[in-house]
Amino acid sequence: MRRLIAAAVLPAAGLVFVGLGGCPPKRGPIDIPDPIAVGDAGPVDLNDVPSKVETTVIDPITGDSPADRSPLLDIMAKENAREMASLAAEADPAYYLAYQIADTRLVNLEAEGGAIVNDSDDSDRYLDVEIRIGSPELDNSRPLNDENPGLNAPLPRHGIVPFGEDPVAIANHLWLETDRRYREAVQALAYVKQDQATLSKVSDVPDFSREPAEVYVGKPVKLSFDKGQWVDRLRRCSERALKGKATRASCSVVFEETTLYYVNSEGTQLQQSWTSAQLAVSVGVKADDGMGLSRLEQRFGIAPDDLPPDDEVDKMIATVTGDLDALHGAPLGEPYVGPAILEGRAAGVFFHEVFGHRIEGHRQKDTTSGKTFASYVGKEIMPTWLSVYDDATVTTLNGQQLNGFYRFDDEGVRARRVSLVDSGKLVGFLMGRNPIKGFAESNGHGRKQPGLEPVSRQGNLIVTASKTVERNELDDLLIEEIERQGRPYGMVFTDISGGFTNTSAFQPQAFKVEPVMAYRLYPDGHRELVRGVDLSGTPLVALQSIRAASREVETFNGVCGAESGWVPVSASAPSLLLDKLEIELGYIPADRPPVLAPPSIKTSGGAQ
Amino acid sequence: MKSMMRIACLVAGAALIATPALEAKKAPPKLSGASSAVTPEILDAVAEEMARAMSDLQIGKNPKPYHVSYKLTEVDVNDAVASLGYTTFKKNRHSVIIEARVRVGSPDLDNGNFVHPQDESIDGVVTFPLPLEATPRIAARAAWLVTDQAYKEALVQLRAKLEARQASGTGQTKIPSWSDEAAVVSEAQVEVPALEDLDGMAARAEKLSATLRGLDGIRDSRVAFTSYLERRWYLNSDGTSLSDTRRVSGVLLAVLGQADDGQELAQYYTRYGTTPDDLPDDAALEKSAAKLATTIAALAKAPVLERYTGPVLFEGEGAVGLLRFALAPHLGGTPVPEGLSPQEAKTFGGALTDKVGLRALSPLLSIVDDPTARTGSGKALIGGYKIDDEGVAAQKIDVVQKGMLKALLMSRTPSHKGDRSNGHARRTAPGGMFHGTATNLILSATGGLDRKKLVAKLLAEAKANGLDRAVIIRQFDDPSITAMPEMTRRELLVMLQNHDADLPPPSILVYTVDLKGKETLVRGAQLAEVPLRAWKDVLAAGKTQSVLNFLASGDSYTIQKINTSNEGAVPSSGIESSVTTPDLLFKELDVQPYTAGQRPRPVVPPPSAK
């Protein structure tokens, strides 16, 4: 069973608090009619105005700077060629060998309640070796049909390789890891052949695609920041955020510097270097019934200087503390089926979970996967005015930086725009080098974190609508839908913290996403914040329930975790009206409050 | 002000122990100074929470805690590793944790020394990280939460223990659960030399590791330096309030190779001390590195040992290893925790708890364990401390005198009514139990022989048994050091399934010696389980003492082999220990061939191959 963990998904900025001040007093239990068949509401009258998506795109090969080529690439290429000269001639011949060396620097600073609680600055170098033996048509990566799939998989580890550019030291460690991986692959292929020999029907879809060689050298970039200044800022930030109902308040930054060196036996040689920066403001408290409540605001940038100045951080603090206080006083939601609005960033996360993970190509092939969309190519899976694509070459959308930008994926394939849904019809999948029926080539989405094997993953997922309404008109449409269905209220979700989607064939093909800010919208137009509800459902129904989209498009930036590790992603979408969405109670762990009251340290002379 | 409060908690008659003075050095080393992370104000805040827990903490009619203790530990570590002249790992790690331990019931019967059958982590001990610049507010909050959690665990643990006793019919034991100990106050900071500079350590590792470049027959090699200090503060509701600092510098050389038949080979060299001055200089380390490389090359062509039963001579680190793996675990007096699985109970040791006063070893042998010792046989010993993990002052113990077992190494969990701790509690055992544990273990022998006579005695014994050769073991494997397993998933699975936790680690430096005294290097030797009674049949011992410091682990051989491979095998985790012993000649032991670790020879020769 495969369980995907979606992103440390990021909450929406500047969340709309409109209407909160006008909330009516809390009501008693609401009389909810039994769930009903929605019935065809007929077409919603949308304007022929497309959603606003203005992007900046970078051609992956811009900035090629051969003068900045590291000697590492030559060392890797030389050893790669030397290995292949022998291994390709073996009885179990290697036909593909790739080396990736990742130099990473990870800076983490975090303050809580005015004190620094985390201060680390680690530099590491990782080595990953990928070897394929047999032939592209059938190689060591072919999953076994019955055995525990993990048993034939490579054993991931932190491949050790020295820092520096010494040919002897580097080549020896490349050799060591290649030897281990080749031996592992020979064992794996033997099991694959045995498995294939016992099957009544074998698949004719190859295990590996042919791709053109790429050569690119990016100029190495270095992190630059004033640590003392950041420590001061984070301390002040976390002090200021500890207010209202919050019992925990932290402000943190993560700065990363990454340089990837990649060489494969097909002639690809890549050097890519980038930095990234993120700032998070997080507050938390327990509700009176013991439910953990938290709010998180994050900002992303290429460099630390891109992060917001203090006055904008103050706005983030105001948002999270305001939301938290409101959540603390909000009633628990209840299981419900009815119409709902997913606001822009929540809609982005929704698409990332419900659609994005299921459109990853390798999932259409895995024998244990539910293959939700495998048989829907060319068919309509959502309204004809909706299209979806993924494009890792987009750097900004409507002026906002996107987190899922990259030039080449972790299999050395150039990033590009991939149309996934065109006017409602499914037209493509996110492809790494693992082909599926009808899609023989990669489209540059083989991604991973160091130490793991790449699989197809999302980059910048972008949902567009050719017909839209203005955002404020969506509320009117929602009220119309509430009344048409005879429901007491509809739901508006403005922020989703994350979720998961089950793609295993042994389990229902269901998703569950966890909204942080969920409002009931009543027919009279007022909103009421509720807490403790999750969205659940099945993807095909959910996508076909979309009734309208807004012109405005919002972006959520974050990182997404799946079997190939954590990778940066973004998801952009208009706000969406769905005529039917199922809401269920979220899991509330047993509350075991401390026996004693919190300590008072008035006699200890410390900060209160 | 709050120090006053802690002192106010003290009971009358609290003993005071002195802070050991640093030994005189030619040039006084730079000292580490006081902690900036754990200040008196932080400790005051914790003490205040302790007082509050003792007076107010109770759920319904469940018992209140009768004993609460806290250990705050600040660890500051510099690690540097290099291979073939270049750094592979270089990091400082600095962290603080607070640990609360809560006991409920009474000293006669409490929740302690019991492994919960469903979840061994339910043990009344809870830890939580503290920031490096904690405020009293943060510390008080952390202490409040860990105490609360530890109390809830202790209640569950006690209930499960009572049920288990009833179900297993062991409910009538009269042995108390916890010993009464006098409160101790020693709050003065123990000063230790500052850590070595990380860049300097890395440069030294690079220089040494470069000497292993370009050598035939070596698959992989690495050199690591570590330097760490561990500051500890211990408070308990008896009124004890202590601080202590441990300090270790170490060096590790590891070389891996492969025999002609494909078996993986490992050789290593480690030295630890309390300052960098205790380590060999670079010239000596270079010689050691060269010797490892030569041995690996020789082992590649060496024959596999044939099954052998007969006299075995343990020399140098071989004797140290035998004591460490086969005897030391049984010198602890903590009874086997109730609920521990039979397999884990074996590795826990404690087979001598009912043998005090009886003959345990050959009359030639005596054993002392001395956590107060800082040096021995002219070398630094790292196994010592001022206070143990239960806040009891370290004590030197005569464990065995002329073969007779006089005392065991005790924690506050008695094995007989009236037992007291002798300051040997450390958290070394499976399940995280606090266990009476060897620290600086010193074995001495009367009538020690020089090497020539010792070998002659070995050969005479072999001949008398009709053998044409005898076996000498000079080193055991240390999986936390040689772990760089180039394993596949399937190979790992086989290893996990086949490993016998009762055996000492494989022997990695073994010789057979024929009756004329000619030594032959062999590989693939596994000493069979050494029965305790074999120690009564030690025929002779050497004249000179070998001293080895090491970092012990409570984990199994396989787990260590796997775990330590991830971060480049940095040699700074484990429990500081030392063993001092002469060479030991055993009358009869079984040594079996060890054939694990077979791998196909690499298809591609190493890049450095001519």
Image: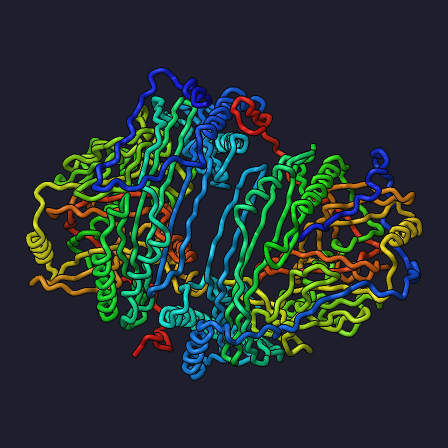
Q: Is residue A494 left or right of residue B535?
A: right
Q: Position of residue A545 (x, y in %)?
A: 83, 59
Q: Position of residue B317 (x, y in %)?
A: 21, 52
Q: Residue at x 69, y 78 (%)?
A: A438
Q: Would residue B410 be found to the left or right of residue A239 on screen?
A: left
Query: Residue A344, how many percent across, how many down?
Result: 77, 55
Q: Is residue A509 visible?
A: no
Q: Is residue A72 above or below residue B99?
A: below
Q: Is residue A509 above or below residue A185?
A: above
Task: Give the residue drawn at x 89%, y 66%.
Answer: A48
Residue located at (67% from left, 61% from top) = A402
Q: Nearer the viewer, residue B460 or B143?
A: B143
Quadrant housing residue B433: top left
- Position of the C terminus of chain A, as image quadrant, is top right
| In front of the other: A310 or B341 | A310
Residue nearer the viewer, A542 or B278: B278
A417 relative to B335 in the view: left or right: right
How many numbered callouts? 0
Assign the N terminus of chain A to one quadrant of the image.
bottom right
Is residue A523 something that shows in the picture?
yes
Q: Is residue B396 left or right of residue A480?
A: left
User: In this orientation, which residue lies closer to the viewer: A125 or B106?
Assistant: A125
- Residue B350 location (% of width, % of height): 31, 38
| Residue farthest toward the bottom in the current orientation of the protein | A89
Q: Looking at the image, is A83 positioned above or below residue A39?
A: below
